[in-house]
């Protein structure tokens, strides 16, 4: 176990050192992404200021939701997005076949050797939004609430990584998977908003089949003491368990698709 952990650490360290060879490019990427998200969030702020709220959510509450959502997403995506988004090319070009003959777990190697440092602006923006909103909301930050926040963020990160893993695994069977990432982000955009503003059918989808509401709305509602439709009293527990449960499902999907993999490389 110790050797495995050391291997993962070395893989991450080598990847980080390689990425930091061009610091200017990395900083420019942070700046461009930061401005992109800040512009999108500013448009939401304008709408809330114009209409006074959104589904009963005021700006500080929604700002906390936006900060939580982007921070949790970045925490999971830095280990999985780039790695599994290009799974289609790795399968098609035969690169994944070469990985299968190495004496390491393929999933672990992909995740830890491809850690992406381009999420600095996501973390900074998310943290600033949560801190500023938390101060305006005057929340009681006792030890239990801090622990609940941290566990909820880890759950959101696991949920993000699990969904990217499942999407990437589809390349083993279909030979293609990148188009699924486009569909993912179409629904991911909805996780920025309180699910209560959507109709009941879409709420059910976002809480079950496509659990995007657990990336922000459910855990933030629990932290702010807001009611969660459909889930009710189960919301606090599910806000923490959604990530681990989805990770187990994604692991099963990964293994099932890998067993059916016949190779597409030429």
Image: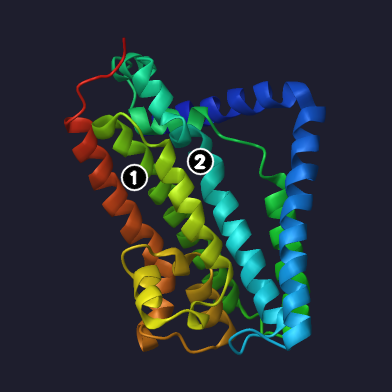
User: Could you tell me residue 116's position as x and y percent?
Assistant: 60, 35
Q: Which mark is residue 213?
A: none
- Callout 2 crowding tier (Cα within 10 Å): few <14, some 14–19, many ≥20: many
Q: Would you place residue 112 above or below residue 124 in this image?
A: above
Callouts 1 and 2 close, C-beta under 8 Å: no
- Callout 1 crowding tier (Cα within 10 Å): few <14, some 14–19, many ≥20: many
Q: Is residue 157 left or right of residue 129?
A: left
Front-most of 8 and 137? 137
Determine which quarter of the picture holds residue 109: top left
Q: Earlier in the sequence, mark 1 or mark 2?
A: 2
Total labels: the figure holds 2
> Measuring 71% from the left and 55% from the top, which residue is drawn there?
37
Residue tagged 2? 81
Residue tagged 1? 166
Q: Which quadrant is the C terminus positioned in?
A: top left
Residue lying furthest top: 266
Element assignment for label 1: helix
Q: Would you place residue 149 above or below residue 52 in this image?
A: above
> Measuring 25% from the left and 19% from the top, which residue is drawn there?
263
Determine which quarter of the picture holds residue 192: bottom right
User: Could you tell me residue 42's position as x and y percent?
Assistant: 77, 66
User: Could you tell me residue 69's position as x and y percent?
Assistant: 58, 63
Q: Is residue 102 left or right of residue 29?
A: left
The coloring applied to the image is rainbow
> Measuring 46% from the left and 69% from the top, which residue is drawn there?
213
Q: Which quadrant is the N terminus positioned in?
A: top left
Label 1, label 2: how far apart the Cα atoms are: 11 Å
Front-most of 189 and 146? 189
User: Could you tell me residue 232's position as x and y percent?
Assistant: 38, 88
């Amino acid at each position: 176990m110790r050797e495995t952990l050391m291997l993962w650490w070395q893989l991450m360290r080598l990847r980080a050192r390689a990425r930091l060879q061009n610091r200017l490019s990395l900083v420019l990427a942070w700046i461009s992404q930061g401005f992109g998200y800040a512009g999108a969030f500013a448009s939401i702020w304008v709408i809330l200021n114009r209409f006074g709220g959104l589904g009963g959510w005021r700006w500080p509450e929604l700002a906390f939701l936006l900060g939580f959502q982007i921070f949790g997403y970045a925490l999971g995506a830095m280990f999985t997005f780039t790695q599994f988004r290009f799974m289609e090319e790795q399968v098609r070009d035969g690169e994944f076949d070469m990985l299968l003959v190495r004496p390491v777990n393929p999933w672990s190697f992909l995740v830890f050797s491809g850690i992406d440092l381009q999420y600095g602006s996501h973390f900074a923006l998310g943290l600033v939004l949560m801190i500023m909103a938390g101060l305006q909301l005057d929340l009681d930050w006792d030890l239990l609430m801090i622990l609940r926040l941290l566990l909820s963020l880890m759950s959101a990160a696991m949920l993000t990584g699990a969904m990217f893993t499942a999407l990437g695994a589809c390349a083993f069977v279909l030979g293609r998977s990148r188009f699924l990432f486009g569909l993912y982000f179409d629904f991911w955009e909805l996780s920025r908003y309180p699910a209560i503003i959507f109709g009941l059918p879409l709420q059910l989808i976002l809480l079950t089949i496509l659990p995007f509401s657990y990336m922000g709305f459910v855990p933030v509602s629990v932290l702010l003491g807001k009611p969660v439709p459909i889930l009710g009293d189960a919301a606090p527990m599910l806000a923490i368990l959604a990530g681990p449960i989805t990770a187990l499902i994604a692991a099963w999907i990964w293994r099932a698709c890998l067993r059916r993999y016949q190779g597409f490389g030429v």
